[in-house]
Amino acid sequence: MTEAETPHELVLVNRYDASPEQVWAAWTEPDNFVQWWCPPDWKVSDVVMEVQPGGRFQQTQTSPDGEMVMPFAGFYREVAAPGRLVFTLSDAPSPDDEARTVMTVALRAAGGGTEQEFRQTGVVTDEHFEALKAGTEMFFARLGEFLAR
């Protein structure tokens, strides 16, 4: 039996020993973003980051053996440096079309570093949600490592 897709919200809060501007740059500059928003040793290609409202977001991740290829695409909805970034992931051809998932990144200075609140809302299977959560937690651990360099 195929699982039905249902609404989910993933909320993760992380703290980084970096300024909000540094964390913002990790989210919005392609050379930075590709270093942490992927599993270790994966290749990232086809990167498009038009970081402005209505701008395109896109990348393809390929496993080390080339067996798994995962394309991501969407549109930026809100861009308010260095505090708030909202973008979508979907197969919708237009930024005005219904998005499959919406990601919101809120950054605020906290104790000499930055608190990041990440929210991802969308419709996925219950089974896929657990993998999504685990993958996103891994990405944010990699973000912490990237910011510490």
Image: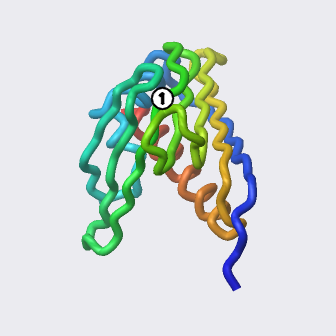
Q: Indicate the position of residue 106 as horizontal and vertical percent values.
A: 62, 25
Seen in the image, is 43 located left or right of residue 53? left
Split into 4 quadrants, where in the image is the C terminus?
top left
Q: Amino acid at mark 1?
A: Tyr
How many numbered discs?
1
Is 83 rendered above or below residue 102?
above
Closer to the camera, 1 or 115? 1
Q: Indicate the position of residue 138 as horizontal and vertical percent values.
A: 52, 53
Seen in the image, is 21 located left or right of residue 131? left
Seen in the image, is 146 located left or right of residue 134? left
Q: Quadrant of residue 12?
A: top right
Location of mark 1 (residue): 76
Split into 4 quadrants, where in the image is the N terminus?
bottom right
Residue found 37% across the figure and 55% down from its top? 71
Callout 1 environment at 10 Å: few (<14), some (14 to 19), or many (20+)? many
Closer to the camera, 116 or 9? 9
Is 4 rendered above or below residue 23?
below
Residue found 68% across the figure and 36% down from its top? 13
Is 45 rendered above or below residue 112?
below
Q: Indicate the position of residue 93 as horizontal and vertical percent values.
A: 43, 43
